[in-house]
Amino acid sequence: MIEVLAPLPVLLPLLGAAGALLVSGHPAFQRTLSTTVLSAVLAVSVVLLFVADAEGASSVSVGGWPVPLGIVLVVDRLSALMLVVASTVALGVLVFAVGQGAADGSEETPLSIFHPTFLVLVAGVGNAFLAGDLFNLYVGFEILLMASYVLLTLGGTAARIRGGITYIIVSLTSSLVFLAAIGLVYAATGTVNMAQLAVRLGELPEGTQVLLQSMLLIAFGIKAAVFPLSAWLPDSYPTAPAPVTAVFAGLLTKVGVYAIIRTQTLLFPGGALDDLLLWAALATMLVGILGAVAQSDLRRMLSFTLVSHIGYMVFGIALGTAAGLAGAVFYVAHHIAIQTTLFLVAGLVERQGGTTSIDKLGGLARRSPLLAVLFFVPAMNLAGIPPLSGFIGKLGLLQAGVAEGTAAALTLVAGGVATSLLTLLAVARVWTRAFWRSPNQSPAEETAAAAAADSVQRHRPSGDGAGSPDGAGSPDGTASPDGSARTALQDAWRRHTAVATATEPGLPPAAGAVRALRPLPRTMVGATAALVALTVALTGLAGPLYGLADRASVDLLERTPYVSSVFGVDEVP
Amino acid sequence: MTPTIVLPVMIGGLYAAGVYLLLDRSLTRVLLGFLLLGNATNLLVLSAGGPSGLAPILGYSDPEAFNDPLPQALILTAIVITFGVAAFLLAIIHRSWRLARNEAVGTDEEDRRVAARRALDADELDPDELAPDDRAAGHADSLAEDLEELADDVDLPAGSGTR
């Protein structure tokens, strides 16, 4: 059964993309087609997960080529779990995008190109998770990156082109580093099959191993946005349409994290660069979250928290213990769901409030309670408030760090706690400004009338003299040598007092001053609410999920399940 | 088999030139740099296949003298990918030119703005540090430019500075 099912998460979206392109003239049919395809991918992934969890890892030789020569797809617990989470959030985001497209017409998605490209992206993600050899992993990366270039620059506005160029060039660089690493790996070992590499790489001299490992880690570190390779992410993500940013934030960086897990456990199990990764994880957490606290734009804030929380996963991987890996795997699953949800909520906020700048937003909690709940639950989950899944994931990682007990690990534990606290600060800032404060307090709602009402109290003592043409009551009290500038200032001041005295002080801003909220389409709210429910459900399902993560991490550390699934139990070369 | 010095020198030269061009702000140079880097990487993979040999076709040459065909298959895939990305980059450059008459890598203005601020929130800040869009409506920024130093202490209603 696995022979039939394993290629489907790659094949179905690719065929669906071709179909969606063919029917691009019929938007309704296109939407149905892509939703059906993604639902099918989700169903297949769930079955794969159950099979992989019951029977352990298994592999498929595509096209029937003998094993080290052909392309292998490997389904083990880790890749099946990643597939399930990825296809779930992809489906949620697609439904959200359908809702947005139905509300906006084709404004955001010209030429109906969104659906085919989105399906290609999902195919690339699936291929990267299932790839059993390094070059196929590279191809998977390229498929998803090509699709992401198109999605990020959708519509081709100036801001998106600017953000997109940064993203494309950085991604290209990382792909080239990856390809060069593959070339060197092949030169050193004569194979790109990961199961075979797991055996052969260990026989290389230590220096060669470290060189190959660090090249792969740099390539994957750029994709996963690990500090200091993370600067591109907050620059390029916030400009894209909401569903695109959401799916990028959820999936693309996690594919990089997945590749790092494979590199560190399967290919280079010696833990040669673990210390370096530990410090990189600490820097990622702290630099990312400090950046998030400084932002005044909701989407940029979320982009920085995305970078910051990658640090938690790298922390778990760098510990190299079963507990650390289990924490990292659980955290990846949790973070894919939570970050996607938060970016979708940011899309709803932008739609309803007209902006994502928290300096301008205000009063959303009273004016749109549903939106407030949709933001509050995942935001608290991201910060790690008990009993939500973010707390469980962080607790698992911190426990693994304490169990390790080295000075570096304990520093990381302290850094993790500080990051969690600062995350709470960052989301609390958004909550108090955008949702809690009364709309009148927000600077954008301050009208000329309100300003005048303020100033008439502040300036009344000098206001009487301002009317005299000789400028005796000049407001700042300094005589300017420049006569014309002074006259102009006086004119301005006279107009100012005229406005101020014409308005009754204390009068509340006119009712029309409060901008009317745009109604939210039901499909968009529904998709977001479903994902919020999913993040809450992750808390309820945390027991079984953590058990699965535990078993996956034991597999990862043993390595034999993966290798023998490709070569058969006895034939490991 | 004699080892060749030509390939390593070529690879190194292409990498150096490619990185130099990639660091430029002009997008056309970035594209050229990317193409050079792509070719350098392809040559690297080619040289990973070991010393040169005969075409790997059974019956045409002795299996002992075969060249390793796998790197060539990998390179072929990589060339196709590079080609696609280069086409997309060209389209982006064209679009950038149409939009801004400029094909340089842009600056992230929001990033600069956040970096220049001294406090976290808009209402803890001197409004002069905010972008005009973010200032309160009654702020003195609505005055004409030559009056800015005089107008610092005055809260003027919106629009009062337009003469």
Image (spheres, grey):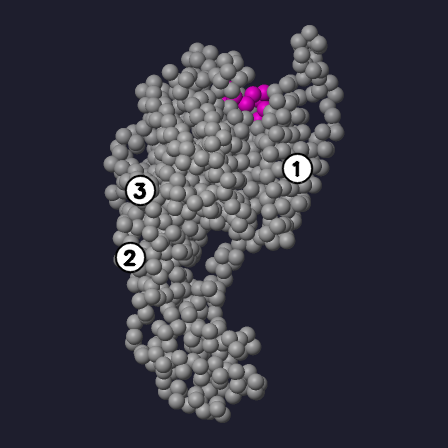
| Left or right, residue A59 beside residue A431 | right
Verify CB contact (< 8 Å) between mark 3 and mark 2. Answer: no
Amino acid found under the numbered disc labelled 3: Gly
Check residue A298 for magenta coloring: no
CA distance separating discs 1 and 3: 45 Å
The count of marks equals: 3
Tell me: B70 left or right of A528. Answer: right
Q: Amino acid at mark 1?
A: Leu
Q: First in sequence, mark 3 or 2: give its number.
A: 2
Assign a secondary structure to mark 3.
helix
- Most extreme residue toward the top, as rendered? B59
Task: Specify the segment rendered in magenta.
Answer: A185-197
* Residue located at (44% from left, 42% from top): A244
- Residue A284 shows up from this direction: no
* Residue to which mark 3 is pinned: A526
Query: Looking at the rendered structure, which numbered label has been put on residue A573?
Result: none
Magenta stretch mostly in which secondary structure?
helix
Residue depicted at x 31% and y 42%:
A526
Q: Residue at position x 57%, y 28% from top?
A: A182
Q: Is residue A429 above or below residue B48?
A: below
Mark in front: 1 vs 3 = 3
Q: Find residue B74 and report its image quarter.
A: top right
- Chain letter for the residue marked with disc 3 in the picture: A
Q: Can you give x and y, in whole percent of width and height, for residue B149 in the image?
A: 52, 78
Q: Residue furthest front?
A: A26
Residue for badge 1 = B35
The lab-note entry on whether marks 2 and 1 share a chain reads no
- Residue A30 sits in which quadrant? top left
Q: Nearer the viewer, residue A471 or A155?
A: A155
| Number of the label disc, if any, that sits on residue A367 | 2
